[in-house]
Amino acid sequence: MCAIELSAGVVKRAAVLADGRELFYYDDPGTSLGAERAVDARDLAPRPDSASMRLDVLTGDWITVAANRQNRVMMPGADADPLAPQTPTNPSEVPSLYDVAVFENRSPAFGPALTEATGTAPGAKNPPRGLDDLAALGLERTRTAVGRCEVVCFSPDHSGSFGTQSVTRARTVIEAWADRTAALSQLPGIEQIFPFENRGEAIGVTLPHPHGQIYAYPYVTPRTTRTLESIERTAPDLFQRILESEQDSERVVFRGEHWTAFVPFAARWPLEVHLMPHRHVPDFAETTDAERDELAPLYLKLLRGVDALYDTPTPYIAAWHQAPVHVGRDSVRLHLQLTSPRRAADKLKFLAGSEAAMWAWAAEVTPEQGAERIREAIARAEEVGA
């Protein structure tokens, strides 16, 4: 198995699953794992056809219709965990014991087809024909949902989250995010890369295994499109101006040499924290080793503080926003938006009426109060861990 040494002593090893999907092992520096990995000997059905996309002509949004996702596994026990290393009784998705593993999703919203046949990925019959094609409005427009969806396993353990990992393991995952961002950006028809972690049943998580995902979209997402419009209406250095404004406010949660965490001025959710690099960097692939090294402990600090808010773990979505692949690279800055619907120990914020239907938000917690609560929770978590 070919090994490639990445930054921070992380080693990458490539493999192929029984149905042709790609699998990548990312070994911790100084790992106890050997160089050889088991072969996936399962007898798997061929991969499903790629989903389709339909245009909502009222908003310009593309909606993916992926019926194959109805058959996903729902909260299996440890003996049937599809993200754990394979055993004689559990024919899971990962053949060998691993530190971090990344593989193509078996039930993707995007792909496996691309706009052009590449490697084992087929070419789509009706692919998007560039950003202008995707922006055109018209009734009953469809395209193949080209792209790629990958699963990122943070650990071979059955339970946990990113926040329960060691600093070394967190650094390995960050290296994997950077490596996969660079690789996926080179695939034909890919317009944006999105690493994220869903945590908790309240968010809709279907697997308790500590993992995240990476989506490679065939379009610029609606959220990023709105961001690009705001930049066009204000200034190309909008993210830097936001960072400087937040750093001068009482909403700062903590500040490092390369990163600042803050509750944004117009936070929507009861719990919302952004984490932003101090210099302009469009995505993980363009961060420096120093930025990745500092991010590992700082991100863990934030997640463990969020979990210290209550007596039980906090559900959240950890969304790493990156610049699109082909537009906005000089203006859209990599940053985390961590959000949770938890507004009290036993209460969740549900979107209904005004917020869900009209996108008109009302926040119940002031951003300043939110920042103070998170700072206090981080201090408690650090005191317990000291």
Image (cartoon, grey):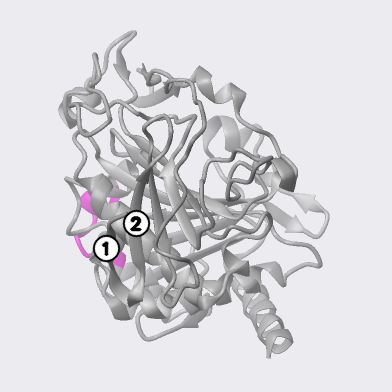
175 or 82: nearer the eye? 82
The answer to whether the residue labelled 1 contacts the one labelled 2, judged by CB atoms less than 8 Å apart, is yes
> In this view of the protein, which residue sits in the foreground, 44 or 76?
44
In magenta stretch: residue 219:
no
Q: Residue 324, can we see it? A: no
Asked if 99 appears above or below 94 in the picture, the reply is below
**Quarter of image, res 205:** top right
Q: Main secondary structure of the magenta part?
A: helix
What amino acid type is highlighted by mark number 2? Arg
- Look at the image and tell me in which quarter the C terminus lies: bottom right
Q: In the image, residue 298 lies at what x, y percent? A: 49, 77
Query: Would residue 199 be seen by someone viewing this image from the given angle?
Result: yes
Marked residue nearer the N-terminal end (1 or 2)? 1
Tell me where residue 376 appears, x and y as whole percent: 68, 81
Residue shown at 16% from the left, 29% from the top: 130
Q: Kindly identify which residue carries mark 1.
A: 4
Q: Residue 125, how many percent across, how many down?
A: 24, 14
**Residue pictured at 62% horizontal, 64% vertical:** 366
* Segment colored magenta: 230-239
Amino acid type indicated by mark 1: Ile
* Residue placed under numbered mark 2 in the picture: 13
The total of numbered circles placed on residues is 2
Q: Residues within 10 Å of mark 1 (few under 14, many from 20)?
A: few
Residue 174 higher or lower than 269, as above or below:
below
